Image (cartoon, rainbow, N blue to C red):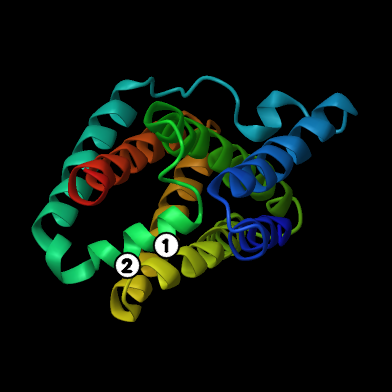
Amino acid sequence: MAAGPFAVASGLLLFRSVLATFILFHGVVCLGIPLMLLLKGRASPGDYGLKKDPGGPWKALITGAALFLAVFLFFATLKDRIWNMEEITTVLEGWGAGSMNPIAFSLMMVVGNAFLEELFWRGYALGRLVRVTSGRRAVLISAAFYSSYHGLTTGILFSIPFAILSVAAIFAAGVYWGGKRLETGSLLFPVVTHLFVDLAIIAAYFIFISG
């Protein structure tokens, strides 16, 4: 699991590239490790929660829409207090985000990020942890690793108080999504609601920062 934070740190601090980070973290770690185990026959899609949610998709869609509104309104209301627009733009430009195609960047940060992070943290990592410890402890450990590298990104982009608040919220989200994964046996709810959260963040980025 430490491979995740290491890949993000390497991509942003060593290569200073959003694209390199996506390849290292999302491609090599989040997709590559679970896929390798599948191809070797050491895991099945069901082990990763890649199956139907017994509750269906509607609860995930409704909850996701509510989270989208909450996250977007939070950024819209407090944008002047939590963001230094010029500083964030400079950092993102240094990571190559400004030179990327906006559609490709959005798909990468919303669809790719939501599915691949959930596949790794709530699919692969959580699935392995519950074999050796309790479900509650497994959820907390996976959420801690999941939120760890967000401390790097938020610490660089935001003020310290908001970075701490962000990491706490991300940890809570990891616990919530992990609990839902164990409750339903499926990744559907975590992936869908995570996608809506990322969509709110990227919408706020283009409206309040990039735009």
Please provide percent x and percent y for residue 82: 22, 68
Please provide percent x and percent y for residue 45: 69, 25
**The quadrant where residue 190 appears:** top left
**The quadrant where residue 87 appears:** bottom left
Identify the residue shown where x is 69% and y is 62%: 6
Please provide percent x and percent y for residue 75: 18, 55
Label 1 environment density (alpha carbons within 10 Å; few <14, some 14–19, many ≥20): some
Instruction: Say whether residue 49 is left or right of residue 42.
Output: left
Residue at the far left in the pictured view: 77
Query: Disc 1 versus disc 2: distance between alpha carbons?
Result: 6 Å
Callouts 1 and 2 close, C-beta under 8 Å? yes
Instruction: Say whether residue 84 is left or right of residue 39.
Output: left
Residue at the spot of label 1: 91
**The quadrant where residue 49 appears:** top right
Residue at the far bottom in the pictured view: 160
Mark 1: which secondary structure?
Answer: helix
Identify the residue shown where x is 13% and y is 49%: 73
Residue 110 is labelled as: none
Image quarter of the N terminus = bottom right
Residue 87 is labelled as: 2
